Amino acid sequence: METNELFQAVLGLTPPWRVTQVTFDPKGGAGRGQVDIQVEAVGASSFPCPECGGSWPAHDTVEKTWRHLDLFQHLTFLHARVARTRCGTHGVRLTSVPWAREGSGFTLFFEAYVMMLAPQMPMAQVAKAVGEHDTRLWRLAEAHVERARERVDMSKVEAVIVDETARARGQCYVTLFAEPGEQQGRVLFVTEGRGSDTFLAFAADFASHGGSPAQIRDVAMDMSAAFMKGAAETLTFAEVTFDRFHVMKLLGDATDEIRRIEVKERPELKGTRYDWLRNPRSLSAEGCERVTSFHRMNLRTAKAYQARLNLQNLWKMPTLQLAREYLRRWCTWAKRVTASKDPNVAAGFAPLRRAVETIREHTHGILNYFRRRMTTALLEGFNSLVQAARSRARGYRSPATFMTMIYLIAGRLDFGLPDLIHSK
């Protein structure tokens, strides 16, 4: 097999495209060596219009170059004179080529390689590995995410889970909407902010992908006022389940706030913050001994901690009826524990009383957990991956790049690119 035929077979070219010349410059490619592959449409006089697909004669040709996967350690480029057709309907249009995306300066194989690396490492490192500027690679990734999302079908989605994640330090957040799954879920939509308007944005995007907000029957989320308002306005037929992990976080935050108040009069509590945020089985022997000693002292922090541990048993209830009765008794007990005629003691228990009142007000949504056992654990898992990627990248320069990375990591999108691992 001659060199041209070999490269034609490797590139997977079919008529009328043929490899007509392959050259190698050992001093090109910034000293790495450069391979240039010339491709021509041999014998073709008409080409399809990229708009309508109709066949039209070539108007003229334009010289184009695409970066391809490196050949060994050498930079490799494809060159071709691409025809422009004069379509009777759409006028002069540049025809498409089978080895590259329209408007791209990379071949599909090169783009597939970048898209394979992008979820695994910071784009700056990908750029260094392939010898391109990361700005070009971000544009590449954003284009593929946008195209892939256009093909996503949401017509059968009946449940969503919603959570926020930080894009950067400070009040910089994005909100994620995901579809739960028995084996694995997927992020459906990501938008800036964490207000009620994020639900409006989701509803519009959902409708554009074949879904209807009216078909959503369940939504799991935290108890933020913004999320509750957004769900009430847009997912009007959905049963809201308040996520169990956020409910427990409410008690954990109340316990920590009580500790901060009490440490002013009981300095021995200083340095014990993380003891109260852990469950007994995850405490060290030293931490377990400290917590036990504070229980003997009848401290408010210890009582709040016990309230949190007692509420954990709610999620073990086998039926909704038993869970409802357990939560009712827990609220009654917690209210009695925090009551005191001493105004100082009562003030010290204020964070726990607020948490108990919040739980009492949202009983229906909390108990909805026992209908489908829905939680936001899937998004918590995605969030861990996303934050790890953010940490490796030392942040993202814009909300767009951060949201693109979330789709790459958790969108389970089909980019329609060559399979570099399993292709033969």
Image (cartoon, helix red, strand yellow):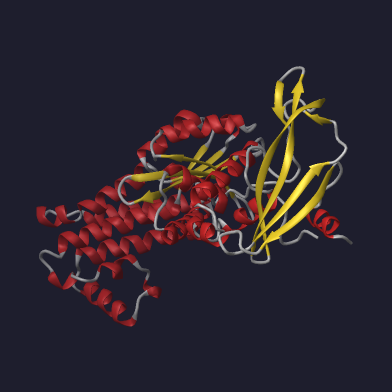
Residue 87, percent across and down?
Answer: 76, 21
Rendered position, 357 above or below 59: below
The count of marks equals 0
Q: Is residue 234 above or below residue 335?
A: above
Quadrant the C terminus occupies: bottom right
- The quadrant in which the N terminus is found is bottom right
390 or 112: which is nearer to us?
Answer: 112
Say which quarter of the image contains residue 209: top right
Q: Is residue 74 above or below residue 414?
A: below
Residue lying at 73% horizontally and 46% vertically, measured from the top left: 99
Q: Residue furthest top?
A: 89
Q: Nearer the viewer, residue 290 or 173?
A: 173
Query: Quadrant of the rendered structure where residue 218 is?
Result: top right
Of residue 78 and residue 370, the one placed in the foreground of this image is: 78
Q: Is residue 85 left or right of residue 130?
A: right
Image position, residue 399 (x, y; %): 43, 43
